[in-house]
Amino acid sequence: MAKVEVKLPEDFLLKLSRLGTKTDEICEKALEAGGEVVLGKVRENLSAVIGSGTKYDSRSTGELEQSLGLSPAKMDRNGNHNIKVGFSEPRSDGGSNAKIANIIEYGKHGQPAKPFLKPARTSSRKACIAAMQETLEREVEKL
């Protein structure tokens, strides 16, 4: 029977052991970097669709755009790290930012849809992944 012994360089083993203790911290930084890319694209798309193509003058207060942001990176019950792009609640008038965003995205009777979320997701996918990979590589190099 054959026997194989693999010896890894000492510095590589040290990096692996340090990576094990800092994995959560590094994952959160990578998610935040990717989230910022997507957030920028969503904000850009939202600004472009608010008040455009309407019969009447826009009544936009800018509150929806200001409420757009990133959640902190959190771990779910399955052990996966997640970050969310969304709207903070409630509005100053007591309404819901999510409701208004949904109406803009999908439309309603008498108001055509003006998608801004779905196009942002598809157009920022590659840039988001690249930003996350770059952050991950930079953090691993620091070890």
Image (spheres, rainbow, N blue to C red):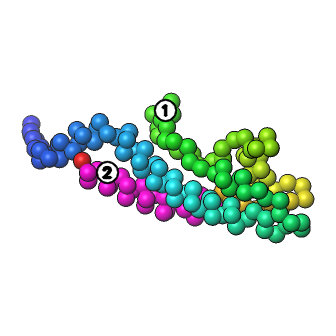
* x and y percentages locating residue 131 in the rendered image: 43, 59
Q: Is residue 24 above or below residue 40?
A: above
The reply to whether residue 122 is in sight is: no
Nearest to viewer (mark 2 / mark 1): 2
Which label's residue is closer to the chain start, 2 or 1? 1
In the picture of the structure, the residue carrying the numbered disc 2 is 139
Q: What residue type is labelled 2?
A: Glu
Circle 2: element type:
helix
Please say whether residue 126 is one of the residues in the magenta stretch.
yes
* x and y percentages locating residue 95 in the rendered image: 79, 43
Identity of the residue drawn at 77% across and 56% down = 61
* Quadrant holding the N terminus: top left
Identity of the residue drawn at 79% across and 52% down = 103
In the picture of the structure, the residue carrying the numbered disc 1 is 78
Residue stretch in magenta:
119-142
* x and y percentages locating residue 48 in the rendered image: 70, 67
Q: Is residue 141 above or below residue 45?
A: above
Secondary structure of the magenta portion, mostly? helix
The reply to whether residue 87 is in sight is: yes
Q: How crowded is mark 2: few (under 14 residues within 10 Å), some or many (20 or more)?
A: some
